[in-house]
Structure formats: structure tokens, C-alpha cells
Image (cartoon, grey):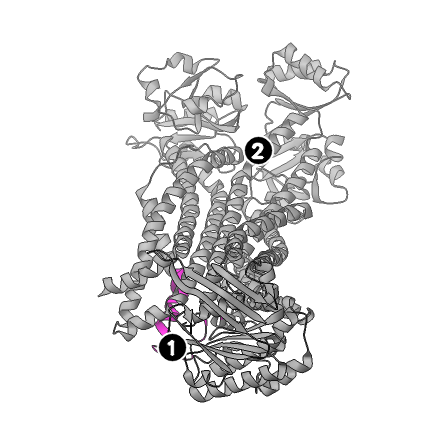
Amino acid sequence: MTALVLRALLSHWWRRPVQLVMVLGGLMLATALWSGVQALNAEARASYAASSAALGQGSLDLLSHPDGTPVTQADFIALRRAGYPVSPVIEGTLPGRDGPVRLLGLDPLTSPPRPELAGLADGQIDLATFLTAPGLLLAAPETAALLPPALPPIRTLATLPADVIVTDVTTAARLLDRTGFDHLVLDRPLPLGLPPIGTVTDLHLTREAPSGDIAALTNSFHLNLTAFGLLSFAVGLFIVQSAIGLAFEQRRGTVRSLRAMGVSLRRVMIAIVMELSLFAVLAGAAGLALGYLLARALMPGVSGTLRALYGAQIDAAIGFDPLWAATGLAMTLAGALLAAAAALWRVGRMPLLAAGSASWARQASIGLRWQTLAALALFALASVLAVVGDSLVAGFACIAALLIGAALMLPPLVSALLWLASRAVPPGIPQWVLADTRQQVPGLSLALMALLLALSANVGVSTMVGSFRTTFIGWLDQRLAADLYLTARTADEARDIRAHLQTVTDVTTVIPIWSVPAMLDGQPGSAYGIIDDPLYRDHWPLLAARPDVWDALHRGEGVLVNEQLFRRSGLSLDDPVQVVDGWEAPVLGVYSDYGNTRPQVMADAAALAARIDPPPILRFALRVAPGTQAEVKSNIQTLFSLPETNIVDQARVKEFSLSVFERTFLVTGALNVLTLAVAGFALFMSLLTLSDLRLPQVAPVWAQGMPVRLLARLDITRSVALALVTFVVSIPVGLALAWVLLAVVNVQAFGWRLPMSVFPADWARLAGWAVLATVLASLWPALRLSSSGPVLLLRVFAAHG
Amino acid sequence: MLDATDLTKSYPSASGPVPVLAGVSMRLSRGETVALTGESGSGKSTLLHLLAALDTPDSGSILLDGEEITGLGDRARARLRRDRFGIVFQALNLVPSLTVAQNIAFQSRLADRYEPDLCDTLTRRLGLSNLAHRLPEDLSGGQQQRVAIGRALAARPSVLFADEPTGNLDEDTADQVIDLMLDLAADTGTACLMVTHSPRLAARLGRQVHLSKGLLS
């Protein structure tokens, strides 16, 4: 009997193929966008895990100084002599063509056996070449292709993971300009009878890598992607809910007849759930395939973003994971049931006799009051979270409450506006148009809500990115005030270059740049020693400072801290901060440091050098006479055979930084466009479905003498007007979203807060897209109406005759 | 006033065109009331739709005050319906989004011939004064038909077409509605063509024509 009931229910869809396409299409798009984003996240995380496991990170015990100071050769020798199987490691990054690439320095003679480096053990790679100058870099073929030419010889090794270059620890120290090691790895099992490790060294034993925890660093990026995936999924479900709601309304008669014929309510409900499950499986499978293709298309962008932002190299290929597919299908099924929940509830409560049941549109209008209350409650929740929220999850919960609240508020708002307008317009056609539009609002509300979500996300994200870009460009102009940035390869070369620069009259200022690793408020970071120069005094981007900040700094009375350290540690001006062992200095000022996620301090060079063993100075910023930049650069390059990457001009650094910036938001932009496209599709499907339902409202007006073409034109105008109202509402919602992103999410994810700018030109462009999408979405239904013959319209009045 | 000659009309179907009217001719004079009767499927509604410029015949001619209307385009036919005709259907007559008062005034406003006094009079005579601000969905079937009649007459049409206007009503309510319709039509000098199944109602109109197998008798 259930099969028979199911067949009766399914027959509805054969007669209304557009609705079927809407349900299946909505589910498919929702699944595709969600599963596509999940595939990207899963692939990236799998890459981090594979990379971590392949290099032994997380599985080996590590010995290091908790304050981040380097492990010395003496520590290493003492432990080896005591019988501990330790091996030194240096980690860092090298500039690659597409961004930084991770460099891992190992000692092949003492390192625990690593299957990825079997080529070294079995003699395939000459150990002597690896160990002796100029050294040898080992990299996977795809990584080798990204490296610049001015490096030691490169040998490809297919067994290596894609995100790392391996070399001898001495070569790594030279390339990274390091003295000492980052940590020692301890191979287990340990020989018996060793002295307690604490008696041999003061190094601390941990199982975590002290730096380079890519998975943790990229969490915020993946959270951002997941949030967008969920938003797209929600927009897709709006389409499904809209279609299913209308279909259920149209099948009231069928359901009532079935029940009148003796089918129990339970059986009807079972048949409906079976029908939904069938749709979910069919659309889910298609959605997974589409999601896979989407992920494949976006993966190069994601890979580039992660490499540029975090130095994480992930495979650009997407693998098929059965668990991913199963999760995606489960999500589709859950989404379909969620979207149909309200309709199922109505069927469950529907009286067997038709009398007295309010129409679907009427029920929806009754719901407007509840929607308004729910929206106000969500706005209150969003406000509380924005003020007191102090985590990424709170930030995203705030965004969710804001967006859902705004979406729920839209239909009551539009309805109220139409009511107000109908009192102001003259009777006749304008009054009918407004009254008719008001009646249509319940049917269109889900599509309009989806459009609002997409437009608000666009306004919010573009405002955030635009504000970031404006601030970032201004910041780059301030911070990159020198004309040339030079890096010597060795301390001797640095000394020779510096001596030469003093003889070049076109070089007006030479500013040394040096730093040491430092443990700042329990996090690994760096401390820079700076000299007193107008380059800093006039240009450094300070967010807050004591009035005499620069004088106090160079008297050694305190330090400057970057915004990340300032916010994460909850510091205030004049609060003490531990810079290096034995030196706690007050905060004199805070500077913005976009692009860096680590804590950083700047101290007077002499004051810092007096408290540590300063490293050799290899980097310099040069200011040159106007118009001589290219000549100075060329001369130094020729004289010292410096590679192109070791002397770069300000414009190139800016260009590189901006390209990294643009790439960072590539995927976000793509998802933005996709969400808007899905919302446009939702609008199209709703208008198409409504065009069938609207005939009883249109036919009497037509019969009284209003031409169908005029009716069709009015329909397009009405849709555009509704889209424009939605767009206007999306501006404050989008700006609120941008504020949460800039003031809450960014601070939690990256540690910096940006001033918000507005970009009305972007809004105008977005309004144009919204109008275009609406005109396109309403064109077909309008064309159908304008080409409706009298037969179709007269069917509405069907009297027997 | 309205002169139809040799009207034919057929509808497409899977098994080929189905003829409905096979050369119908009829005349409707100013102020005349005519009942159009016939069995189900005889083509009564089709003939009314053609005369009311809601549809076009396959062949034949319809003259309104000597002017041919069959060749008119959609826009011109719409103007004709708006300015010269009033139409009452069996069901779904009203604009669901407008109130009773707005529905009654609607066509006269479309025709730019709105007379507040006439609308008020019609509303009162139709017994709808207390319901003027209700939406159609709040009215009974008989009340809705009264609104439709009021709306059709408020624009002072030359011809009132009524297609089974009382088909969904009980006998008493049907009588009241027809009485009102004919009284009001007489008061405004409007000709009336009414499609009906009911010989009892048909007998109350000035003339009866019967349609059978696509032809009038």
C-alpha cells in the first residue's frame, strides 16, 4: 500500500517538472557547495597530516629551549656523549616563486631512519655532496620547480612530501642565517643505563614541534571556508524549502483524498519521508559529483593561498574519500528533512475535511509575527556575542545570528513597506500592484531571504577585503620606506658590502636589520634590534604610543610590540613584557604588523645587543639618492655577484606582498560569486513556481482589460523592486557583518584589528548584478505569462459549458 | 449592437482538433437580456468568451456597433473589455489581493470611468456595505458573486457577460443574485448575455437561445 501511496504522491512531480527540478537542483547545489568546501578542507588537512607524519613531527620526542633560544652545538655533543641518540634539526622557510617553502635541515649521520630519505641511506644520493659545501637540497619534483635559481644544487626525490626541502643541517644554518639548532630529535627506544636527561642538559623534552604547526595556523582559514560552505548550503536549502512548501500546499487535496480513502496519516508521512529520501540520494549523488569538480577547480587557488599565507604546501589534486561521500549524502538527507520539516508538520496537523483551513499564503503571513520576534531575539544574541565574544567560534556564532536574524526580518519588513506604500499610491493599477505584491511576499520570501544572505555576504566580505586592502596598501607604503632591501649570504660578505656602501655617495642611509628568536608571552616570536633613524621615526605605522616613544625606545626604556602580541596578551601601554631572559621592558608603543601571525617586539639595537649574543647582521635597508635606485642595485649585484632575490627594490616587495594579498582572498571571492549565483537560481525557481500559482490572481485582472504584456512587465518591475529593497537591506546587514569580521573574527584569527572603510562603488556594482540576476530570473516567467493564450487564462474560470 | 456571424472554434487535442462551434450566428441589441443555454460541453462558455473578446474565433465575424473586433490584437481587445464589457464568471472572479470596495471600483478605475457615487450605490444595493473592507477570501460564494456583479457594472459597460454566475450558489441565493444583476443592468441600460444551465433562471431573461452540437437553435 505504501508503494501505491508513494506513486500517488510522486505523480505530482511528473505534472510539475519545474518544481521537481527546483527541489533536485536546490539539493544538488547545496550538497555541491558544502561537499566541495569539505573536500578542500579534508585534502588540505590530509596534506598537513601526511607531511607531519612523513617528517616524524609529532611522533618523535624533541628537546628544545622553552624560550625559543637556539640549541647549541655543546648541548648536542653533551647529549651524544652521554649516550642519548639525539640529532639536530633546523627549520625555516626559503622564498619560493609562489611564496615561502619550508626548509628542514637534518644531520643524516645521526638522524633517526626516515623512509622518505631512503635515497640517502642506500647510496643513491652521494652523502659527501650532501654534507659538504655548497650542499645539496632534496625536494619533491613539484617543490623543486618552485625554487629560485640562486640556491645550492637541487636533487629531486619523489618520496619526499610536497611541502618541504630537506638539506644538511649546516647548509640549512647557512641558508637561514642561523647559529645553533631549533631543536634536537630523540630517537627511541633509548639504550639502557643512561643518566637522567636533566643531569646532562637543561633542554626541555616535548612531543610537539616548537614551530611550524601548520594545521593550527591554518585553522582560521578552514573555519572561514567551512562558514562559507554552510552559508551556501543554507542558501541551497532555502530553494528546497520553498519548492517543497509549495508542492505540499498543492498536494493538500491528494493527501486529503488518500486519507479519505483509508490511508493512515502515519503511512502518508512514511511515504513522504521515503519520497524525500529518494530525492536526497539522487540529488546528493549529483551534488557530490559537482562538489568534487568544484573542489578540483578551486584547489589551485586554495593551495596558492595556503602557501602564500602560511607556507603550507598542499597537493593540488583532490582524492576521492568514501567517508566524505557518505558524510555529504547524510548532510543532504538531513538538509532535505530539515527543509521539509515545516511542511511535514503541517501535513501532520491537516484536518481530514478541508473546511476552515487557511491558505498557505495566509499561514505564511501569520508566521510573519513570529519571524519578527525570532529576528529580534537573534539580533539581541548577535549584539551580546559581538560585545562579549572572545573566540573564533563566538565570532562565527555572532555572524550566524546576525545573518539568520536579518533573513527572518526581511519578509515582515517588505510586507510593512508595501503596506505603507499602498496607502500612499493612487487607487487602481498602482494599488493593485502593491496589494498583489504583498500577497506574493510569502511565496517569494525564502528566495528573497536567500538573496539577502548572498548580498549581505558579498557586501560584508567585500567591505572586509576592501578595508584590509586599503589599510594594507597604506601600511606597506609606510613600512617599506627604504628604497632597497639587501640580504648578504654570509657574515663576511655582509661586512664587505657594508664597507663598500660607505663609499657610494648615492647611498644616503644604511640601516641594519637583525632579529633573534624570542619567547613572547609563552609563544615563539622574534625580537628586532633597530637603530635610531628617520626611517622608523617618520614612517613606522604606530597604532598607539607614548608621546616620547622614539626617544624612550632609544634610551632603552622600553620596547614596541606588534598588534598581535598586544591584543592576544591583553597588554596596555607601559605594561611590562618579557623580551629575552632577564629583560622585562615596558610597552612604549604598538605597531601594525599585517601578514605576520607571530608575536614580535622591537627594541633599541644597542639595548637588545647588550642583553644577548647578537647574531651576524646579514640584512640591510638602503635609502638612496632619488633616481639612482636601479643603478645602485645593479652595481652591488655585479660587484658581489648577488642573486636577484638578495637585493630587491621597494616596488617589487610591494608587488609581491599585494599579489600574496590578492591570492589570499581568491577562494573567498569565488565562493561569494557562487553563493550569489545560487541565490539568483533560488529566485528564478521561486518566480517560475509562483507564475503557475499566480494565474488565478492575474486572470481576473486580464479579463477586465489589462493586457498580458503589461502584466508581464509589471511582474518584472515588481521582482526588480523587491530585489532592490532586499539589496538596500543587505547594505546595513553586510556592514554589520564586515564589522564583526574586522573587529571580532580577524582579531581572534590573526591578532589584528582593521579600520573599516566603505566602498559605495562596489555596492553600486553589486546592485547592478542583483538587478541583472533578478531580471534574468523573472524573464522566463514573464515571457510565459505574456505568451499565455486565452485558453490558459480562461481555464482559471472554468465553468462547464 | 453586437452582431456575430458564422463563428467557428475548435480546440487542439491529442487526436486532432475538436470542433466546439460550427458556424454560430447571433445578435444582441442594446439593453436586451439573453440567456444562453445548452448541455455541458455544448460550447456556451466558448461562445461567450469569443463575444466578450476574451478569445478569438477560428473564423467568422463579430461586429460591435458595426466595428469588426475579431481581428483586433491583444491590446485592443483588452481595451474593449475594459471600456465596453463587464464579465462575471462562475468562480474566481475577484482580485484576491484587493478589498471588496477596491474590487468594485477596480475596472472603472482601469477604464478611467470611476464614479464614487455609483460604486457606493452598487455596494449598498448589493448588500455589501458592511463588507467593504474585507478581502474576497473572507466572503461566502454568494457575497463574492455580488462583488463581481458590482465590479462589472461599476464601469457602466455596454454588455454584461455572465458565465454561470450562480453555478456555485443555492437556489435562493442564485435568485437574489440574478434579480440584482438584471435590476442593475436595466438601471444602467446594459445589455446582458448569461450562460446558464437552469431553465428557471433562463426564463427570467428577455430571450433564450439554445446551443447544441456547436449550433444555435
| The C terminus of chain B, quarter of image | bottom left
Vertical side of A145 occupied by B80: above or below: below
Q: Which residue in the protein does label 2 denote?
A: A660
The location of residue A155, given as percent across then percent down, is 42, 17
Q: Is residue A61 visible?
A: no
Which x, y percent locates residue B175? Answer: 48, 87
Looking at the picture, tell me which residue is in the foreground, A85 or A214.
A214
Amino acid at pointer 2: Val
Magenta highlight range: A338-361
CA–CA distance in space, label 1 to label 2: 64 Å
Q: Position of residue A124 (x, y in %)?
A: 33, 15
Residue at figure coordinates x 61%, y 43% from the top left: A465
Residue A166, numbered label: none
Residue assigned mark 1: A354
Q: Residue furthest bottom?
A: B172
Apparent side of residue A539 relative to residue A611 in the rendered image (left or right):
right
Q: Tell me which chain the residue with mark 1 is part of.
A: A
**Label 1 CA crowd tier, 10 Å (few <14, some 14–19, many 20+):** few
**Mark 2: which secondary structure?**
helix
Reading the chain from its start, which is encountered first: label 1 or label 2? 1
Label 1 residue SS: loop
Residue A680 in sight here:
yes
Residue A104 belongs to magenta span? no
Q: Position of residue B20 (x, y in %)?
A: 40, 64
Above or below, comparing residue B47 to residue A564 in the picture: below
Q: Nearer the viewer, mark 1 or mark 2?
A: 1
Amino acid at dot 1: Ala
